Image (tube, rainbow, N blue to C red):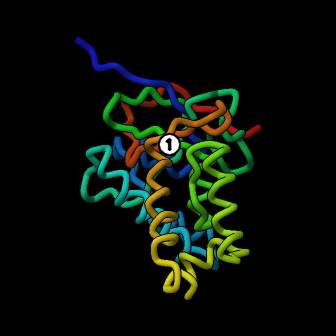
Amino acid sequence: MSQKTRRFWTRQRPEVLQELNSSGIYRVKKEYIEEKNGSITDYYLELYRWYTRTARKYLSIPPECEYPIWLSPSEEFMLQPVEDTVILTLDIPEGSYLACNMEGWGYRVNYWYVPLDAEDDRKHREELKRYGIASEDELVTGAKGNFYPALRRKITDSWERIFTEPARTPEDAAATAWEIRREWLKGVRYYE
């Protein structure tokens, strides 16, 4: 019996397709992250290390895989091809990808609280206002977290909701895998 798969799309550099064709497997290279992010590379490497470390609670990820590969579960909302990229269409087996919430990821990237819903968000903002905190990221990145450790912990604990709370809209639905295998490749779209 064949394993159940799900269709995804991912925008990648042409070198990813070349590596996939030559070796049969692709795993994110640190140098690609460095090239793409330039002066903010360390910031993204730290984010991706956190993401992978946390994702290991929900998915078995090979130890040599350090960085996620972003996937769109919707052709309608996928990243579109741009110069020097290809779009890979993949059928990935269950257990090889992890669904995530891109809205929540945006909050995490900014060191913000990931709310459960609009009411939870409203209550959180009221709490910040009561404490006189204008920039909640300072609770994680600055000294304010030393004065409000419970509030800091509330924020950092909420980040796991990226994996546990479903996306509210199709545009916010995403997934990640930590490798792509040649046998998963079902199509390639080139930039024109």
Give the secondary structure at mark 1.
Answer: strand
Outermost residue, right side: 192
Mark yes or no: residue 89 visible: yes
28 to 177, vertically: above or below: below
Circle 1 is placed at which residue position?
100
Q: Quadrant of the C terminus?
A: top right
Q: Who is closer to the viewer here, 44 or 128?
A: 128
Q: Quadrant of the N terminus?
A: top left
Direction from residue 157 to residue 86 in the image, left or right: right
Q: Position of residue 171 (x, y in %)?
A: 68, 35
Q: Position of residue 8 (x, y in %)?
A: 52, 31
Seen at 62% across and 59% down, the residue is: 124
Seen at 42% across and 64% down, the residue is: 50
Number of numbered labels in the structure image: 1
Q: Position of residue 32 (x, y in %)?
A: 53, 63
Direction from residue 40 to residue 93 in the image, left or right: left
Q: Who is closer to the viewer here, 123 or 164?
A: 123
Q: Mark 1, residues whose alpha carbon is within 10 Å: few (<14), some, or many (≥20)?
A: many
Direction from residue 64 to residue 124 in the image, left or right: right
Outermost residue, front side: 130
Quadrant of residue 72 within the rendered picture: top right
Q: Who is closer to the viewer here, 50 or 117?
A: 117
Instruction: Identify residue type, mark 1.
Output: Cys
Direction from residue 56 to residue 28 in the image, left or right: right
46 to 108, vertically: above or below: below
Quadrant of residue 44 within the rendered picture: bottom right
Seen at 55% across and 88% down, the residue is: 143
Mark yes or no: residue 36 visible: no
Seen at 61% across and 42% down, the residue is: 117
